[in-house]
Image (spheres, helix red, strand yellow):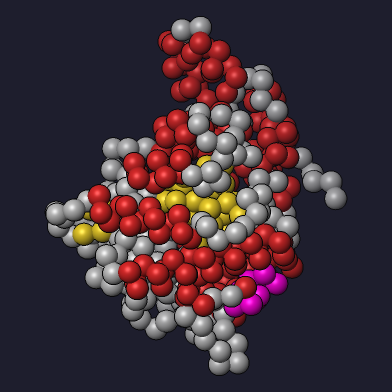
Amino acid sequence: MAIAVSKGYELAREQYAKLGVDTDAAIEKLKNIPVSLHCWQGDDVIGFDHDGPLTGGIQTTGNYPGKATTPEQLLADMDKVLSLCPGAKKLNVHACYAIFEDGEYADRDKLEPKHFKKWVEFAKERNMGIDFNPTFFSHPKVKDGLTLSSPDKATRDFWIEHGKACVRISQYFAEETGVPCVMNIWTGDGYKDIPADRMGPRMRYKESIEAILSEPFDKNLVKPCVESKVFGIGVESFTAGSAEFTLTFAATHDGCLPLMDNGHYHPTEVVSDKIPALLCFFPEIALHITRGVRWDSDHVLLFDDETKEMAKEIVRCDALDRVYMALDYFDASINRISAWTVGFRSWQKALLSALCTPNAMLKKLQDENRLTELMVMQEEIKTMPFGEIWNHYCEVCGVTAGPEWFDEIRKYEDEVLSKR
């Protein structure tokens, strides 16, 4: 069905065209770029396989009412979010969200594809792929805060088997949905205070990841990643999976991708600068996109400067088909459906803004050393009528453009969340 073009969009399209930007083409391109929506925003990273607290150097703050506590509730909440967000989507699932039926239970080292059948059914009905994450936290077999780097072989072996099970499940996801599955390996392994041995834990971690990746898989279907972290609660002085460790591991192990979470670095580091650096060497990379406030606090993603810069670098590098993009934040202090929606829409805005930036013209100014003019043009672009482009994109995708989408969330809270 043809979408009516507003006068505002026509005028905005003309202004962008003067800079060499085809806004229609930008919209058409973006609506087919998948972004993974993470399931763990809906229940504060608890999952369905345990009743204990969230552990492993991460923490959710707040106690807003209406948290999902069953698979049915979580899937319904995600469905509401999907209906409010433009663009193509994937699901991002943690292993602790296995759905057991008829009283069955399997520990994490014994998980099977059948325990994620409902996730596959949900995804296939909505024409989505699924990304996956082994869950190396919130479990009694995390010994002394360690998993894959533990000096205790039995502990390492348990978590290696969990990782292998997740490789098999990732292959199942990809085969069922027809979409490659990004499988991300991250642990909170580390020490609160200064360790006496830094290399030993990292060598054990390296060998454990290698053991996980020895599980057979189709490299065209499963995209294993390793994710770094600078520190976490209780592991302030040392993490086994530092940036240097994970980048070097990915660079020296065929078929393994580096995954950058933009909250997992020092406050003065920016992932927007790291994206083009990694793209010089890696055919593909992955991102977990969040908003760190002073540290890896996983605040809801906003349409802020660094978010825009990250999107710009992906687009400028012509890497929309080389970067796997997934959201990763969790806020229990506000309505969780709104948190999901604001973050997803913010990343969509950032990508659309990047696609509507006259990157070729700006690059030419830089290459010709016309840096004064470059500064002028970069500032002028900031006041372009981007809002009209965004509104039209939402209309093309069949979702509400303005803040009226929040009315749907108010209604959902009154009719569904408040009754939990």
Residue 227, horizontal then vertical, whole percent: 42, 51
Of helix, strand and loop, which mostly describes the magenta segment? helix
Residue 155, above or below 2: below
Left or right, 130 with reference to 288: right
Outermost bottom residue: 103
Which residue lies at the image location 66% right of the left edge and 66% below the top edge? 172
Which residue lies at the image location 48% right of the left edge and 60% below the top edge? 212
Is residue 264 in view?
no
Whether residue 150 appears in magenta in the rendering, the answer is: no
Residue 65, horizontal then vertical, whole percent: 42, 77
Residue 255, horizontal then vertical, whole percent: 56, 46
Residue 41, horizontal then vertical, whole percent: 47, 66
Residue 191, above or below 14: below
**Foreground: 410 or 182?**
182
Is residue 225 in view?
yes
- Image quadrant in which you'd find residue 390: top right
**Foreground: 163 or 46?**
163
Which residue lies at the image location 45% right of the left edge and 54% below the top edge? 210
Left or right, 294 with reference to 185: left
Which residue lies at the image location 69% right of the left edge and 32% below the top edge? 23
- In this picture, which residue range is highlighted in magenta? 114-122
Left or right, 236 with reference to 290: left
- Image quadrant in which you'd find residue 354: top right
Left or right, 251 with reference to 230: right
**Foreground: 339 or 95?**
95
